[in-house]
Amino acid sequence: MTAPPVKPDDTLLIKRLIGGEADAWSEFVARFSSAIFGAVINTLRKAGFNADDGVDIAQDVYVRLCKDNYHLLRQFDPQRASLRTWLGVVSSSTAIDYLRRNKRQGLPLEAVPEELYKVEPKTPEQVKIPPGLLSERQALVLRLLYDRDMDAAEVAAMLGIDSQTVRSTHHKALVKLRKYFTEGEH
């Protein structure tokens, strides 16, 4: 699998942001706000929530990106994904974290969509993942998330890695699995 094309101006824009250039932030927001907001809204809708909190969550994304002297933004690797794709993952993760926080804060039962409480019946046969399709870390992360029903923060603590790394590893494993099962390679 080849790396996505890297837009040199994306990498340069991040360097300008980290370097503290005054107009870099405005350019960043103008260029990527629709991608960030779109990923947030899409995540909220998939979870059965309306988009009312989308603006607040998008603001949370910007706060995460700027926090600790752009710590998260410094982790962007243009060899792994385009900046737009990476920001989509960060935005979706932020929206999921928001939904989890609100779920824990004791929302009234009638305010939480029924889909969030739906439990899929266990089937006696699990999906067979071909050996070598996933890396050892990807397979481990999937087992911890799905078999042990852990969340990203718990997996990160157990493995001694950042929760964003867990989410990224999870995403990459799912992409490989989707490709394998949709292309009929099995």
Image: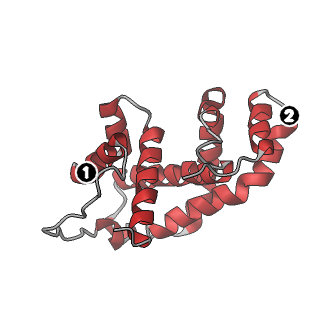
Circle on res. 138: none
x, y percent for residue 86? 60, 48
| Mark 1 or 2: the one toward you | 1
Going by the numbered disc 2, the residue's amino acid type is: Ala
Say which element carries label 2.
helix
Q: Amino acid at mark 1?
A: Asp
Query: Residue sitting at 47 percent across and 46 percent down?
Result: 168
In terms of secondary structure, where does tag 1 sit? loop
Give the image quarter of residue 153: top left
Residue located 43% across and 45% down the image: 169
Q: Is residue 10 above or below residue 108?
A: above
Hey, which quadrant is residue 122 in on the image? bottom left
In-front residue for pair 86/118: 86
In this image, 133 relative to 15: left or right?
A: left
C-alpha distance separating marks 1 and 2: 44 Å
Question: At 37% from the left edge and 66% from the top edge, which residue is drawn?
Answer: 112
Q: Quadrant of the C terminus?
A: bottom left
Counting from the top left corner in percent of width and height, residue 51 is at 57, 67
Vertically, is 184 above or below 147? Answer: below
Closer to us: 40 or 82: 82
Q: Is residue 86 visible?
A: yes
Residue ID for mark 2:
22
Q: State the residue position of label 1.
A: 149
Q: Badge 1: few (under 14), some or many (20 or more) residues near its Cα, within 10 Å?
A: few
Counting residues from the start of the chain, the first of labels 1 and 2 encountered is 2
Outermost right residue: 23
> x and y percent of residue 142 in the render?
31, 50
